[in-house]
Image (cartoon, rainbow, N blue to C red):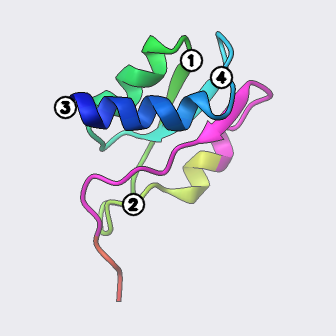
Amino acid sequence: MFFRNRCIADCINGIDLKPGDEVIVPTYSFFATAGTISRLNGVPVLVDIDPVTFNIEPKDIEKKITSKTKLSFPCTFMVKVRI
């Protein structure tokens, strides 16, 4: 658990996240993803996933991007490749 949080924090620290900056994350992910963003004073913005592949839904990302969006964090929880 600590290792995963630390890895997420290191990635986010690399973009110089400021308080109030938004980070787009999938709704279907490990809770540490959004939790770590909040702990670093960012705002996690949850986007839907494709129910077949469980991957982040690109059309929902487009809807959620604002002037405060700093990063889209496309982490995976369970991935299926659509064939």
Q: Amino acid at mark 4?
A: Leu
Task: Give SS at disc 3.
Answer: loop
Q: Amino acid at mark 1?
A: Gly
Furthest residue in direction bottom, as rendered: 83
- CB under 8 Å between callouts 1 and 2? no
Residue drawn at (51%, 15%), measured in percent from left and top?
A: 40
Residue occupied by mark 2: 55
Q: Where 35 falls versus 49 (above or below)?
A: above
Residue occupied by mark 4: 17
Q: Estimate how packed mark 2 is, as few (under 14), some (14 to 19) or many (20 or more) residues with alpha carbons within 10 Å.
A: many
Q: Estimate how packed mark 3 is, as few (under 14), some (14 to 19) or many (20 or more) residues with alpha carbons within 10 Å.
A: few
Image quadrant containing the C terminus: bottom left
User: Residues in magenta?
Assistant: 62-79
Q: Estimate how packed mark 4 is, as few (under 14), some (14 to 19) or many (20 or more) residues with alpha carbons within 10 Å.
A: some
Residue occupied by mark 3: 1
**What number is the disc on residue 27?**
none
In three-dimensional space, the C-alpha distance between marks 1 and 3, rounded to whole angstroms, equals 20 Å
**What number is the disc on residue 42?**
1
Residue 65 screen position, x and y as percent: 69, 38
Residue drawn at (60%, 47%), measured in percent from left and top?
A: 61
In three-dimensional space, the C-alpha distance between marks 3 and 2, rounded to whole angstroms, equals 22 Å
Q: Is residue 14 magenta?
A: no
Q: Amino acid at mark 3?
A: Met
Q: Where 61 falls versus 35 (above or below)?
A: below
Confirm whether residue 70 shows in the render. yes
Q: Where 73 falls versus 80 (above or below)?
A: above
In three-dimensional space, the C-alpha distance between marks 1 and 4, rounded to whole angstroms, equals 7 Å
Residue drawn at (36%, 30%), measured in percent from left and top?
A: 6
Residue 10 screen position, x and y as percent: 49, 33
In three-dimensional space, the C-alpha distance between marks 4 and 3, rounded to whole angstroms, equals 22 Å
